[in-house]
Image (cartoon, helix red, strand yellow):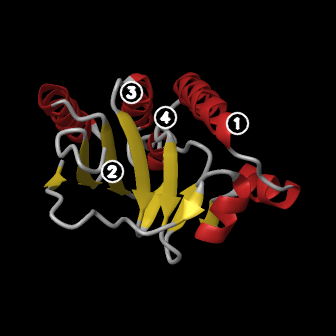
Amino acid sequence: MENDAGAEAWYTLSGDVNDSMVRRVFDASAQMAQEGVQVAHLLLHSHGGYISDGLCLYNVLSASPVRFVMYNAGVVASIAVTLFLAGQQRYASETARFMIHKSHASPNAGIGADELAVVVEGLRADDHRTESVLRKFLRLTPEQLLVHARTDLHLTARDALAAGLIDEIRDFSPRPGARLINI
């Protein structure tokens, strides 16, 4: 594939996981299909965003005929970790970090018990959706699971390797002459 320029392409994707990112990835995926890209190397840098948007991107990229190879060179956090897991191969730079946590919300002031119950129900549903993806890939230690149950769990590249989040510590390094496209 290295010799077939159309078969392999290099991309960067950064920012909040939201409807704008979903549209950009959809547009890029359509372009990939048109150009015959078979392997997309994707450097992801994101502090997270909306759960439904992240799950949408995870589902679409996981089912894509394009094979995604994901990289973390800085930070992949919150719902962006779920998006990152869409990669069939996953790498992180030595100095990269990951962060996962349970869903959270900031309800409006003056919210009543019934409305608050709906918020809690939604948070539990979102936790169930994201945790079902994380459980497919991650092997967290009992200590890590305890932290994750209470607060943000931060993982170094070495921690991510041990947990199965990445396959190897490796930098995003497009081959010489490769075109780099920002999504």
Q: Is residue 56 visible?
A: yes
Vertical position of residue 146 compared to residue 53: above or below = below
Residue 12 location, quadrant = bottom left
The secondary structure type at the circle numbered 4 is loop
Name the residue rendered at 39%, 27% in the picture.
56
Q: On the image, which quarter does residue 39 sit in?
A: top left
Residue pointed to by mark 4: 111
Separation (CA) of disc 4 from disc 3: 29 Å
Report the residue at 70% width, 36% height from top. 135
Residue type for callout 1:
Arg
Residue 16 location (% of width, % of height): 30, 51
**Residue beneath disc 3:** 56
Residue 101 position, x and y percent, is 61, 51
Q: Nearer the viewer, residue 107 or 134?
A: 134
| Crowdedness near tag 3: few (<14), some (14–19) or many (≥20) residues, C-alpha within 10 Å | some
Report crowding for label 2: few under 14, some 14 to 19, many 20 or more residues within 10 A (C-alpha).
many
Tell me: 163 left or right of 117: right
In terms of secondary structure, where does tag 3 sit? helix
Local crowd size for mark 4, using a 10 Å CA cut-off: few (<14), some (14–19), many (≥20): few
> How far apart are labels 3 and 1 at the CA level?
18 Å
Instruction: Name the residue that disc number 2 marks.
Output: 42
Q: Which sits earlier in the primary sequence, circle 1 or circle 4? A: 4
Label 1: few (<14), some or many (≥20) within 10 Å? few
The residue under label 1 is 135
Judged by depth in the image, the label closer to the viewer, 2 or 4, is 2
> Given this view, does label 1 or label 2 mark the residue nearer the observer?
2
